[in-house]
Image (cartoon, helix red, strand yellow):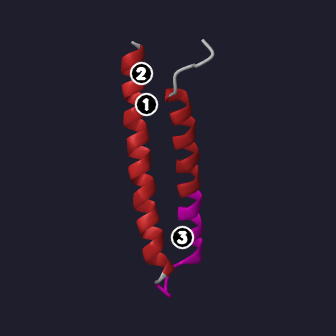
Amino acid sequence: MQENHTEELQSRIEKLKTEHRDLDDVLKRLAVDPSSDELQIRRLKKRKLQLKDSIVMLENQALPDLTA
C-alpha cells in the first residue's frame, strides 16, 4: 500500500515539474515579446509559484518519516 502511494506521489510530482518547466519556457518567450500581455504574464508567474509550492509539499510527503 505504501509503495503504491509513493509511486502515485512521484507520478504527480513529475507531472507538476513538467508543467512548471513548460510555464518557464512560455514565460521566457513572453519576456522577449514586446506585445505580450502583462496580466497574462502575472497570472502565469502566479501559477508557476503555485506549482512550485505543490511540488515541495508533495516531495515532503514522499520523504520517509525519519523520526519513526
Give coordinates of residue 32: x percent, y percent.
Answer: 47, 83
Residue in view at x 40 percent, y 60 percent? 22
Give coordinates of residue 47: x percent, y percent.
Answer: 54, 56
Q: Earlier in the sequence, mark 2 or mark 3?
A: 2
Residue in view at x 36 percent, y 27 percent? 7
**Does the magenta run of residues contain 3?**
no
Q: Secondary structure at mark 1?
A: helix
Gap between marks 2 and 1, in whole Å?
6 Å
Gap between marks 3 and 1, in whole Å?
30 Å
Q: Residues within 10 Å of mark 1 (few under 14, many from 20)?
A: some
Q: Secondary structure at mark 3?
A: helix
Residue that mark 2 sits on: 5
Q: Residues within 10 Å of mark 2 (few under 14, many from 20)?
A: few
Name the kind of residue labelled 1 in the image. Answer: Leu
Q: Residues within 10 Å of mark 3 (few under 14, many from 20)?
A: few
Quarter of the figure with residue 2: top left
Residue in view at x 41 percent, y 24 percent? 6
Quadrant (top left/top right/bottom left/bottom right) for the N terminus? top left
Give coordinates of residue 60: x percent, y percent.
Answer: 56, 32
Residue that mark 3 sits on: 40
Name the kind of residue labelled 2 in the image. Answer: His
Q: Left or right: where does residue 68 sit relative to residue 1?
A: right
Magenta: predominant secondary structure element? helix
- The reply to whether the C-beta atoms of the residues labelled 2 and 1 are less than 8 Å apart is yes
Determine whether 63 is above or below 46 in the image.
above
Quadrant (top left/top right/bottom left/bottom right) for the C terminus? top right
| Magenta residues, start to end | 33-47
Q: Secondary structure at mark 2?
A: helix
Name the kind of residue labelled 3 in the image. Answer: Gln
**Which of the two discs, 3 and 1, sits closer to the camera?**
1
Residue that mark 1 sits on: 9
Q: Determine the residue located farthest toward the front in the rendered image.
A: 66
